Amino acid sequence: MSAVVVRTPAKVNLALMVGPLRPDGFHELASVYQAVSLYDEVTAAPATAGEISVTVEGVEAAKVPANASNLAVRAAVLLADRCQVGDGVRLHIRKGIPVAGGMAGGSSDAAAALVACDALWGTKLDRTDLLAFAARLGSDVPFCLVGGTAMGSGHGEVVTPALVRGTFQWVFALDTDGLSTPAVYAEIDRMRGDLAVLPPRISGELMAALRAGDAAGLGRALANDLQPATLRLRPRLRQLLEAGEDAGALGAVVSGSGPTCAFLARSADHAWDLAARLSGSGVCSSVRTASGPVPGARIIEP
């Protein structure tokens, strides 16, 4: 096989509920993920034995590490090590997902690398094995394999598909600078102090809205426990969220750890109108429209 190309989506957290800090250093999470139609493409091509490398192109590509710390490289190394593969691989990432924007771009690339290298090397892992490898790489990586809409538990890595009717239209407003996910979690711990933290749970209202395809109900139920910490670290995002609400968004929420903000629209036409108004507001660097749910990492070539 000469090369394998995998297309892999961004995610938005419809709900991200953060429970107590666990002994292993992770927080107990309850989340609802949705994969949306902003994509990276990861190409895996043969290389000399033992070589695993990565190159990156696209918007903000310079912010993505092109070394062993890249999650896609780590995914390939893990697969090669566990499956005793001696072949090498050259990975190439074409970025379409915002970098450090709370939309799982790095995790999605790792999921794509697992799928691509599995096909390139002929390791023929089943879904259970791929998900187990994904969970070792990061909390969001298993969902990026599955895609669609799903509930996440544990520290986010245990993924259960959710029943959803219809398609939802989104607008994502990007900030000029990314945010560190560990810094946001550290801030929420600092803000909580010695307060007792209850186990996280997803609201019945959100799940009912998904089952009914009720965009207005979903907009009202969007929730993110990390949002206060993100806003403490990046106060100007308050103005961005307010601008989206003033422009008629059904719901507005910080995506994951931020700083990208997600706005739920009534329709595709409304999404374009909302995007235009946010773009002209001067409170964000750029905007993107997308729809969801969409599938997870999938081979598109060959």
Image (tube, grey):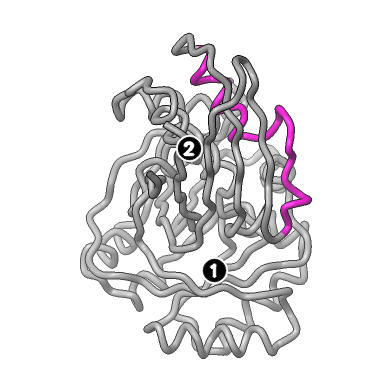
- Quarter of the picture containing the N terminus is top left
Distance from the alpha carbon under mark 2 to that under mark 1: 35 Å
Region of the chain picked out in magenta, as a range: 60-81
Where is residue 137 drawn, in percent x and y? 54, 29
User: Cβ–Cβ below 8 Å for labels 2 and 1?
Assistant: no
- Going by the numbered disc 1, the residue's amino acid type is Ala
- Give the residue number, with chain letter if any, for mark 1: 262
Q: Nearer the viewer, residue 147 or 224?
A: 147
Which image quadrant is residue 243 in? bottom right
Horizontally, residue 214 falls left or right of residue 282, namely left
| Percent coordinates x, y for residue 32 in the rendering | 40, 51
Choose the circle earlier in sequence order: 2 or 1: 2
Element at badge 2? Answer: loop
Q: Position of residue 111 (x, y in %)?
A: 47, 38
Q: Nearer the viewer, residue 120 or 194?
A: 120
Comparing 136 with 234, the one in front is 136
Magenta segment: does it hold 140?
no
Q: Is residue 301 placed above or below 261 in the rendered structure?
A: above
Residue 264 left/right relative to 285: left
Q: On the picture, is 207 further left or further right than 22? A: left
Q: What residue is pinned by disc 2? A: 3
Q: Give the secondary structure at mark 1.
A: strand
**Dot 2, how many residues are within 10 Å of its Cα: few (below 14), some (14-19), or many (20+)?**
some
- Asked if 100 appears above or below 124 in the picture, the reply is below
Image location (x, y in percent) of residue 68: 71, 27
Q: Residue at x 43, y 80 (%)?
A: 265
